[in-house]
Amino acid sequence: MRRCLYAAICVATLAAATRPVAAESLESGLILGPPRAYSIDSVTARYTHFDQSGHGYQSQAGETTFPRVAPGLPGSEFVTVDQPQVEIVAHQGERLTHTLWLPVDVVTAASPDALDAISTASRNTYSTAVQLASSYQASATTNVGVLGGFHLEPNFRSWNVGASYARSLAEDNAVLAASLHQVYDWFDRFNTDGVRNGRVGRSSTNGNLGLTQLLTPTTIAHVDYGVTVQSGVLGNTWNAVPVRSANMRANYVDVELLPGFRQRHAFLGRLVQWLPWNGALRASYRFYVDDWGLVAHSAEAQLFQRLAPWMYLRFTYRVHQQSGVSFYTQLAAPQATLRSADSDLAPFVAQTVGALIAFDLGMIPKLRMLHLEVGYERYQRSNDLAMNIYTGAVGLRF
Amino acid sequence: LKPLVVALVLACAGCVLVPQNRRGRLADPMMAVGDESTESYRKQKLYSTREGAAGGDGATAGGGCGCQ
């Protein structure tokens, strides 16, 4: 009797082992088909135009960038930048994702800070970069990635590599992420008269640690800390500094003198909240401190309002206040060992206001979604610099 | 540092498990924690070249351009 029972169990087990082929296949393979070896998920193209005007003591440029201003007076910081970008995201198999990114900057009056004050040779220039990032979904909760890229522009080369790790916790209610980046820049050294003096380099090493946490079904919080350590030549080498004459004659212009090392810390906190009237609020605060004596606070609020299932508006306001580096000056003492008149390193308050409209259109053949957006921002600094920014993007989601 | 520590403590105090079937609002593009990547680069380009206080949010604070 026992033998018969045992044999029956064995037969039933074998039958169960061979039977489920059809049932399991129905769950994925037969319905969705075999996974594609390579597929493009999205293609995004963005075009941005920056139109900057203002004055700074590091610049020697006249109003039309040539000839240069008299020593000791702030020069023009006029510059326009046209910046097209393309980003392609693709899947290779089920676990590997590649992101290829190509930005190009076409710059008019690239060097109003010096070179164009003595020569118009670099009045129109360009830069381009290529970066490939690949991430691997190692498990349901763990993602690891690597990236590499290079940046080219006249008299400047840069290479970057990086690695990232992300782990989701508590049923995807929290994500802990860490990343490490290394950038090496190699560029020509010029003096304030535009004379080339060989090549120099600088290294930037950066580490980040971030945590994203769901607080409620309509609230997300994010905190992040980043540290960057830089060494080498930490300026563009041609920034001018007005220097007081030692013998009480006319002041003159000389090169910027910067430390060869900089340690920079940035802390960020962000909250995203769904609003009951079909809107959302994204608010963030960033605190920055470095060993050059610069302390900065930045706060930003973005208010989203959905007007239709396929259209929303975004309003942006940002305020940034920084103390300036300890050796910032508009007229340096002749014996100063560190000096900079760069208006970007000065104490100032900057405000950004902007608006954007976005469309997410479905029902298009061969596309999951077509994303369109167009926006405008105005950036205004308290130390005589302003910028108009026009941007537009087209995104194809497959 | 104090505001950051306070924000972190408040965030941790609010940690709850939100089940998958209650995350519908979070899927809306308006609820993204960060900017879309080309938009993020556009903003970084502006702020890292015109302010002396770049970095944070996963980005390096300098290098890669002819500025600082």
Image (cartoon, coloured by chain):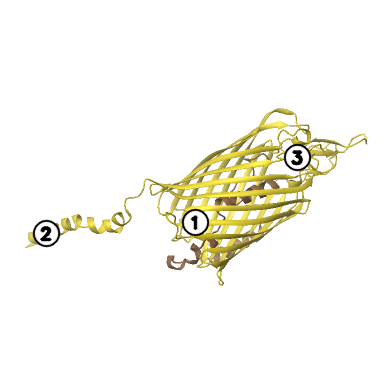
Chain colours: A yellow, B brown
Answer yes or no: do the residues labelled 2 and 1 have beta carbons within 8 Å? no
Q: Quadrant of the N terminus of chain A?
A: bottom left
Tag in front: 3 or 1 = 1
3D distance between C-alphas at marks 3 and 1: 41 Å
How many residues crowd mark 2 within 10 Å: few (<14), some (14–19), many (20+)?
Answer: few
Question: Looking at the image, which residue sits at the far front?
Answer: A365
**Which amino acid type corresponds to the residue marked 1 in the rendered image?**
Leu
When asked about the image quadrant of residue A195, the answer is top right
Q: Which mark is residue A370?
A: 1
Residue drawn at x 92%, y 34% is A247
2 or 1: tag closer to the N-terminus = 2
In the rendered structure, the residue with mark 1 lies on which chain? A
Say what secondary structure mark 3 lies in: loop
State the residue position of label 3.
A113
Give x and y (percent) for residue A28.
31, 56
**Which amino acid type corresponds to the residue marked 2 in the rendered image?**
Tyr
Say what secondary structure mark 1 lies in: strand
Q: Are marks 2 and 1 on the same chain?
A: yes
Question: Looking at the image, which residue sits at the far left?
Answer: A1
Residue A129 in view: yes
When asked about the image quadrant of residue A155, the answer is top right
Residue drawn at x 72%, y 38% is A111
Residue drawn at x 36%, y 48% is A36
Q: Which mark is residue A6?
A: 2
Residue drawn at x 28%, y 55% is A30
